[in-house]
Amino acid sequence: MKIRVQSIHFKADEKLLTFIQEKADKLDHFFDQIISGDVYLKLENVGDEENKITEIKLSVPGATIFAKEQCKSFEEATDLAVESIRKQINKHKEKLQSHVSEYKATLNSSE
């Protein structure tokens, strides 16, 4: 899966972009129907150490999955956001499977 990475208020280095792409590629193992993905990296101008924000938005058939995390580093925020996305993907898959099984049950009962 190819994702678009946008860094806001700074220039992201190649190492960070590669890290994010590798993490996003792992999501394909959980759900192979991901249409597209966007990652937004933001630096907030606050005195707090946890000023790095990663937002991930995935388009999948029937839904848009979104996660936002704020941490001390972009790598840590990306890890947490990807884990949140993974959980949401699993819920989405369960929902799709229940709809399919309900549809099959409806077809079998009408025959």
Image (cartoon, rainbow, N blue to C red):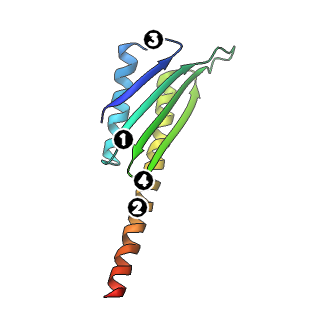
The amino acid sitting under disc 4 is: Gly
Q: Position of residue 109 (x, y in %)?
A: 36, 86
Q: Which residue is mark 2?
A: 96
| Mark before the other along the chain sequence, 1 or 3 | 3
| Mark before the other along the chain sequence, 1 or 2 | 1
Q: Which residue is mark 4?
A: 62
Question: Which residue is drawn at the image coordinates 44% and 55% (left, top)?
Answer: 92
Is label 1 or label 2 in front? 2
Mark 3 surroundings within 10 Å by alpha-carbon count, few (fewer than 14), some (14 through 19), many (20 or more): few
- Kindly report the distance in space between the C-alpha atoms of the residues bearing marks 4 and 3: 33 Å
Mark 4 surroundings within 10 Å by alpha-carbon count, few (fewer than 14), some (14 through 19), many (20 or more): few
Q: Secondary structure at mark 4?
A: loop
Q: Quadrant of the C terminus?
A: bottom left
The amino acid sitting under disc 1 is: Leu
- Kindly report the distance in space between the C-alpha atoms of the residues bearing marks 4 and 1: 17 Å
> Residue 27 bears which disc, if any?
1
Q: Position of residue 55 (x, y in %)?
A: 51, 31
Is label 4 or label 3 in front? 4
Mark 2 surroundings within 10 Å by alpha-carbon count, few (fewer than 14), some (14 through 19), many (20 or more): some
In this rendering, is residue 23 above or below 104? Answer: above
| Mark before the other along the chain sequence, 2 or 3 | 3
Residue contact at pointers 2 and 3, CB within 8 angstroms: no
> Residue 11 bears which disc, if any?
3
Is label 1 or label 3 in front? 3
Is label 4 or label 1 in front? 4
> Residue 18 bears which disc, if any?
none
